[in-house]
Amino acid sequence: MLSRFVAVSRTLESKLRRALPARIDHIARIPYGVPMPDALPTRDPAGSRPIRLLYAGRYEHRQKRIMALPKLARKLTESGIDCELTIAGEGPAGDELRSACAGLQNVRVLSAQGQQELAALLETHDAMVLPSRYEGLSIAMLEAMARGCVPIVTRCDSGSTEAIEHEHSGLIADVSP
């Protein structure tokens, strides 16, 4: 029924090869990329303003762990970290997310953004937060990196560790699934 399997990371390729040893010759890895701007944006120094965090993606519980975002904003505020969190997207947990963020002064929830609007958000934010339980090689993470927005991802069995060297090209948070 399926003639080929395509993985987007070494991790996923290894999993397929272990799961389907009889089909090893039919498994390929094809990494992908995103458009790069001609130059990276210049940002104001973070010490002179709040740290700007961004999440852009589906509002969903199981994979995306979306309700971790209002908890993150609260925890950072309680810890005395001056930050602003922008959440952009849409999905089945949208109403619950908006309700959980309603009283948070440092959080704004936006609808899904077009490619140009998302690029502008990435260029004005310091870090992209991706609290997923699992991902492939996240396009949102690659887009953030292409715009000079530091990716902060949860460690998961995915392709993120192929693109991020912890504390060098991003941050990998050790969080239980």
Image: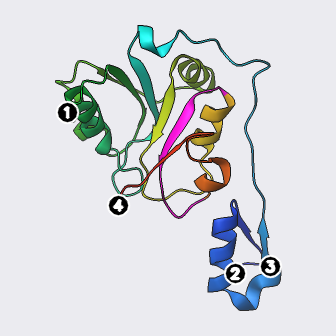
Please tell me in which quadrant of the rendered image residue 54 appears: top left
Figure check: 3 above or below 89: below
Determine whether, in the image, residue 36 is placed left or right of residue 101.
right
Label 3, on which residue? 26
Image point (51%, 11%), residue name = 45
Rate crowding at label 4 as few (under 14), some (14 to 19) or many (20 or more) other CA atoms within 10 Å.
few
Query: The residue under label 4 is which amino acid type?
Result: Ser
Does residue 133 belong to the magenta stretch?
Answer: no
Magenta stretch in the rendered image: 147-158
Q: CA distance from mark 1 to mark 3?
A: 47 Å
Rate crowding at label 3 as few (under 14), some (14 to 19) or many (20 or more) other CA atoms within 10 Å.
some
Determine whether, in the image, residue 168 is placed left or right of residue 64.
right
Of pointers 2 and 1, the one earlier in the residue sequence:
2
Label 4, on which residue? 176
Label 1, on which residue? 99
Image point (59%, 52%), residue name = 160
Q: CA distance from mark 4 to mark 2?
A: 26 Å
Label 2, on which residue? 17
Callout in the foreground (4, 2): 4
Rate crowding at label 1 as few (under 14), some (14 to 19) or many (20 or more) other CA atoms within 10 Å.
few
Discs 4, 2 touching: Cβ within 8 Å: no
Image point (53%, 64%), residue name = 157
Callout in the foreground (3, 4): 4
